[in-house]
Amino acid sequence: MIFKDYYKILGLENSRVSSSEIKTAYREQAKIYHPDVNATSNFSEERFKDINEAYRVLSNNSSKRKYDRMWNNHVAKQKIKYEESKRSSGSVFSDFFNLFFGDLRENKIDEEKESKRKTKKVPIKGENVETSIDVSIEDAFYGVNKKISLRTVEGKMKTFNVKIPAGIRNNEKIRLLGQGKTGINGGSNGDLFININIENDSRFQIKGYNLYTDLFLTPWEAALGTRANVVGIDDESNVLIPQGVQSGETVTIPGKGYKDSKGGRGDLIANIKVMVPKKLTDEEKEMFIKLKEISSFNPRNIY
């Protein structure tokens, strides 16, 4: 293989030239050795091919750097003179040129492979789907298996078995892998996210890890004080009610609330409600009348 001095071919003294200088030198040399100007000269024809070859290498920043490194490390040190290289039959560029751009036929094959790779359909994961379901406080506390039915994008109903773990938090999401929309071009399916909405009921309300319930007392229990059973979500607690307790006051039972994230429990908070009987027996009525006569208590005069 013959190493070529591409700078000399373009009439440049050294490699310290700009891209615009390379382009100008190429145009000048091309005018001199163009086959139309030198129709009978075989040397001009080969020279014109070398000029085009030199310009192709030096006008490309990547191939120019590669050429400069090779020339400085191997060619210039040995002071090898420029010679014409033999070109294979039908070849436009020399073997030396192929060091920088590769075999043109191989390049074409590589380009075709790259084009096919780019046009190949890329797998895309399907979209996730979100929905929500309502569960009772007790179901959320103990855990439950529920069946939910959703309409697919095709309009068909599909049933899912959902395991709700014990102690799940309000608005926490359950993820069902691969139950979302179908993937594209062989991509994996999306996921189904189910938002858990814990519903309050007539017995309990949930706030954070605490459970709230009502404790109903008679007027005499509130006035005299008593012990009363407060029904929690999983057992009963007997608590002391002090005398004179008022409606709206609370009694807290520690560790009897909802499950927390650390394996413990919140509190059960009982809201006191003093209830007056709507119907009285004659004896009860007489006792209330007697109490009215002997009692000096007037709630409207407490301020």
Image: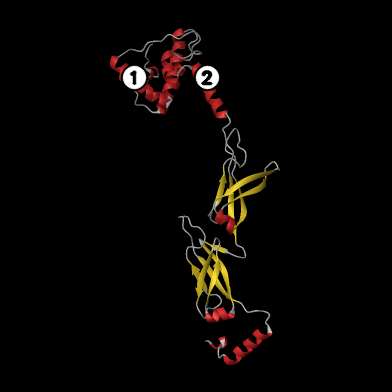
> Which of the image's four quarters has the N terminus?
top left
Q: Give the secondary structure at mark 1.
A: helix
Residue at mark 2:
109
Q: Earlier in the sequence, mark 2 or mark 1?
A: 1
Q: Quadrant of residue 213?
A: bottom right
Residue 27 left/right relative to 168:
left
Residue plotted at (49% across, 20% down): 107
The structure's colour scheme is secondary structure
Amino acid at dot 1: Trp
- For the residue pair 158 and 116, the one nearer the viewer reads as 158
Residue 44 in picture, x, y percent from top left: 45, 11
Question: In the figure, 36 relative to 242: above or below?
Answer: above
- Residue 181: image x %, image y %? 62, 41
Packing grade of label 1 (10 A; few <14, some 14-19, many >=20) is some
Look at the image and tell me whether residue 53 can be seen.
Answer: yes
Residue drawn at x 41%, y 15% as measured from the top left: 96
Q: What residue is shown with label 1?
A: 71
